[in-house]
Amino acid sequence: MLLLLKGENMASPFDASATAFPSRRSILKTAGVGAASLAGIPFLAACTGGSAPSATGTDSGGLTFGSGSSDDVPKRAYQAVTDAFTAKTGRKVTTNTVPHNDFQNKINSYLQGSPDDTFTWFAGYRMQYYAEKGLLAPIDDVWETIGANYSDALKKASTGPDGKLYFVPNYNYPWGFFYRKSLWAEKGYEVPETFDALKTLAAKMQGDGIIPIGFADKDGWPAMGTFDYINMRLNGYQFHVDLSAHKESWDQQKVSAVFDTWSALLPFQDPGALGQTWQDAAKSLEAKKTGMYLLGSFVTQQFTDAAVLADIDFFAFPEIAMEGRDAVEAPIDGLLLSKKGGENKAARDFMAYLGTPEAQDAYAAVDASNIATAKGTDTSKFSPLNKKCAETIADAKYISQFFDRDALPAMANNVMIPALQSFIKDGKMDVKNLEAQAKTLYAAQ
Amino acid sequence: MSSTAQELIPPEAQEPGGGRIGRTRGGRVRRLTGRDKVVLSLMVGIPTLIELALVWLPTLMSIGLSFTRWNGLDLADIRPAGTENYQYITQDYPPFWPAVQHNLMWLLFLALIATPLGLLLAVLLDQNIRGSKIYQSIFFAPVMLSLALIGIIWQLFYQRDNGLLNFILGTAGTPQAVDWFGDSSVNIWAAMIAATWRHAGYVMLLYLAGLKGVDPSLREAASIDGANAYQTFFRVVFPAMRPINIVIVVITIIESLRAFDVVYVINRGTNGLEMLSALVIQNLVGEGQVIGVGSALAVVLLVISLVPIVFYLSRTFGKENRA
């Protein structure tokens, strides 16, 4: 979800307070009319945050760090990492935190202007895109020191189109069906292994007066999770990657099959999906109004009651046709080095530091809702759910990044969101039109 | 709305006349001293430059970019695309035609419901009823709020589970509860009602000013001639407010084209709330930017906007020329 559109979405996984209107800030900023004075503050902050301090931070052996992790918990978590780095090396880190909506929406001008030395970003197409445009500095030297800390899958996810390494993973989080153990035990539901079993289970839940599958797509991006999983289970991981990169046509039987399969699931998904955000749907799951909910593990941030949190479990998307359950959707967040930052030794040191278990433990000590990516991080404080998330990712043969991270952002935001929303409404999808739009948009890049 | 305010001032008062006119020995009239010229050229030049830089330059660039493909990164990446972007939005881009339709609905709704409602409020409040000022303040209050805020306020009415409206209808918490902002068959109406709440207050204020400006002797003459209240208003008072009516027409059209904030707050202009302005933002700003397509959408909006602008200007200047 990276890219998510618009930051608002991205925002969401980390922003527990963002409910009905997650991006009030950006709305005010955009709409600004009567609220100009209110809006002015974040707007100015957003404008200056990226550029002004970077001019001063580069000298004296320090570095600047641009962070889009503006919500309280991740912000404090990155603060802990930079403090630990400074304590260890004596090099000063000047952090410029920008509201995540603004950070993501302005990434184009940010990278072309005067970016910070290092900045938070995501793996996937969108990282590769900027690498290809020469806006990032390769960090193969950094990977020589940290390479042993990462699995091959993560290394692959950190590689640019030219084969050089650009990205240092910090954490990721798996997508799966989350449910309340107590509800399932009470009603005698069992974890479905196959898609047919999932449909049978859903029908049973419907009979029990429960909405079987929680669903929220007001923001547009969450439905991509369902699309990705059905696509990967039907056509395999590689097809997902090729389709996202538009190396495969949308106008083909394989894609139609995804929507045909999905339409069997639609009647079981929350009919109010288009009017609610993922936070709303998380509340329904908590209230046992819905039986299960397909989302990233960040959904647990909504469960502030420890008893509820302990009652949450999840299972991987059931197998349909291909590759069993080899692929898991687990978006990775981490750091990139800007072209300008590539000349700063301290920035490279900081990137290398983030790739160590030590730094990721410092992060996880504050933000425990994600799974650290480096080998050797401390797992002793993991909840059973954390452990399961970590195992799911570790066992996966393929890790996908979510449609809007794997695909061209314009395709994800301008085409897929309206297309999936209308599919949710009427169960119809015009794959010819998807292909026509994809052709134009990918050609424009 | 400075143009509005200006429009309300009688042309006589706008005349810069009354200035000192110097007469040189040769008998030639020299109206301006050297200093006047400097001041005047600064006063004309600076706004002109600002206008050029902030309005005309971007407008022309948008038009130019709408015929190209560009990823927004490197100027060297700009490639000509002919009319492909226009073909794309009209043939391949599903939200485009709904957006045009919604903009038209918005216009009709404001013109047929919101504006007459504002006129009605103005006429009622012009009757010197008790507490008129309080009512005026109440009806005008929404105008002072940004549309973004209005979207948030109306959310309280429209929410599916806790909203006031479903509560009043007795459907809150039941499966029959209508999700006013989420159900694409009703949400455009819900949004237009929210916008009406604001627009009516605006129109009311303008008409109140207009009504105060109507010469009371006209009404007297009408009543002496035996006209009833209905005839007095529609045959005498309303036509006498012709300048205001033109302003209102233009404002209504502009508001319907500008409509953006409310739908953007609700769901960023998707799922039944597509508007041209929201599509422009979607395609031009942020990560999903497709400069060519966004520019083409902006040009479409510009062309549509030019119609009322030209109408308004020709009215304004046409009148001055006659005078």
Image: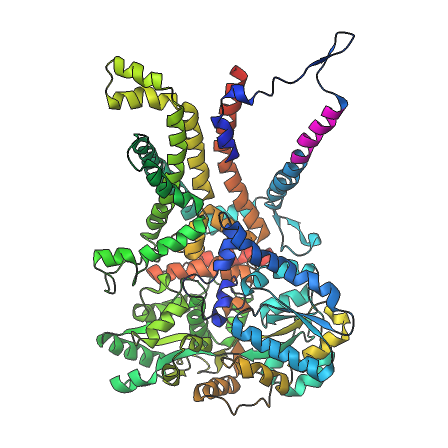
Taking the magenta stretch, the answer to whether it contains residue B259 is no
Q: Residue A128's spot in the image, x, y percent?
A: 63, 69
Q: Residue at x 54, y 81 (%)?
A: A366
Q: Residue at x 34, y 22 (%)?
A: B237
Query: Range of the magenta residues?
Result: B35-47
Q: Is residue B59 above or below residue B128?
A: below
The colour scheme applied to this rendered structure is rainbow
Q: Residue at x 48, y 83 (%)?
A: A326
Taking the magenta stretch, the answer to whether it contains residue B41 is yes
Predominant SS along the magenta part: helix
Q: Residue at x 55, y 50 (%)?
A: B293
Viewer-side residue, B96 vs B197: B197
Q: Is residue A132 above or below residue B243?
A: below
Q: Residue A396's spot in the image, x, y percent?
A: 51, 84
Q: Residue furthest bottom?
A: A380
In the picture, which quadrant includes the C terminus of chain A? Answer: bottom right
Instruction: Specify whether residue A246 is in view.
Output: no
Residue A408 picture quarter: bottom right
Q: Residue A174's spot in the image, x, y percent?
A: 48, 79
Q: How many marks?
A: 0
Q: Residue B190's spot in the image, x, y percent?
A: 33, 50
